[in-house]
Image (cartoon, rainbow, N blue to C red):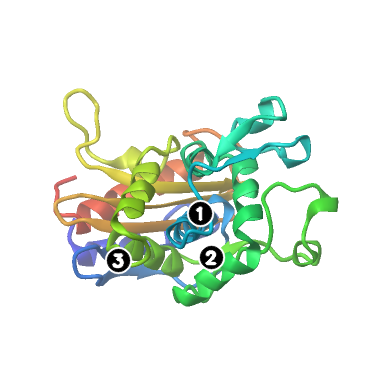
Amino acid sequence: MNHQACLSLLPLPDHPGRVGVTVHDLATGELLFAHDADHVYHAASTIKVPLLIRALQRVAAGDLRLTDRHVMLAGDQVGGAGVLHELSPGLALTLRDLLTLMIVVSDNTATNMVIDRVGLDDVNAFLAEAGLRDSALVGGLQLPPERRTPRQRAGERNRTTARDMGRVLLGLARGAYLPDDLNELALGILSRQQYRDVIGRGLPTDASGEPLYRVASKSGELLGVHHDVGLVWTPRPLAVAVLSEGGLDPREHPDNREVVLLTGLAARLVAAFGGHSS
């Protein structure tokens, strides 16, 4: 599929809601493709990408240490994605453990523990410094009403756009935020994310079923909301952000109707811009 043909993919046929997309060239930073890139979506778990970066910036500054242990209390445990809410309180986890759980299994308890240590204002300062003008961390994830911030109680939500997610991924890939060792740590954690139902799922594979290209990504999912943002080391390496809302299939399942549509879209985008044949 050529670049011009890619333009006909969006709006995405048969998707009942909205879909926002950006595709960047990692080598040049060029924005190769955008659709509805500035529409503000509920960030869901994609907000964990800038949170990961900011936490590691604090490590680089000496404010936090990856080896410091933090005890998980019963009050820290929240539902949704992850495993920590299934374990016994009193578990002592290093900051590296928390960051890994936050991304690899999208653990919400780990995420909130990281937010507590980095601070909402600090994360939002990073978003502003990075030029992510339509993104904000308003509060923790899956919190009970009594633990929500005033902004959450007023109806605000963590938010982002496809343009902002593309920019933050591009900055991470190009080493703009972190020293080399921590940059590689961030990319390594993102490369091990276990939820790969959109970008990673649609990539070409070898004879054994293994993807031909490395992916470092973060998905996000809520009822009707399906996102996936990531770096793909195709022959022409890319940063791809696919955000959506208004899905009608309620299933948390790879065969969710809208997820399947987004998987096909991501595969076509990577084929069109990544320099491989689909």
Q: Residue at x 49, y 45 (%)?
A: 258
Which marked residue is nearer to the observer: mark 3 or mark 2?
A: 2
Residue 130, quarter of picture:
bottom left
Q: Return the mark for residue 46.
A: 1
Image marks 2 and 1: residues in contact by CB distance under 8 Å: yes
SS for dot 2: strand
Q: Return the mark for residue 7.
A: 3
**What is the CA distance from the residue labelled 3 to the residue labelled 2?**
23 Å
Q: Residue at x 71, y 66 (%)?
A: 156
Graded by Cα atoms within 10 Å as few (under 14), some (14 to 19) or many (20 or more), the crowding at tag 1 reads many
**What is the CA distance from the residue labelled 1 to the residue labelled 3?**
25 Å
Residue type for callout 3: Leu
First in sequence: mark 1 vs mark 3: 3
Q: Residue at x 19, y 37 (%)?
A: 212
- Does 190 sit left or right of 31 as displayed? right
Q: Return the mark for residue 160.
A: 2
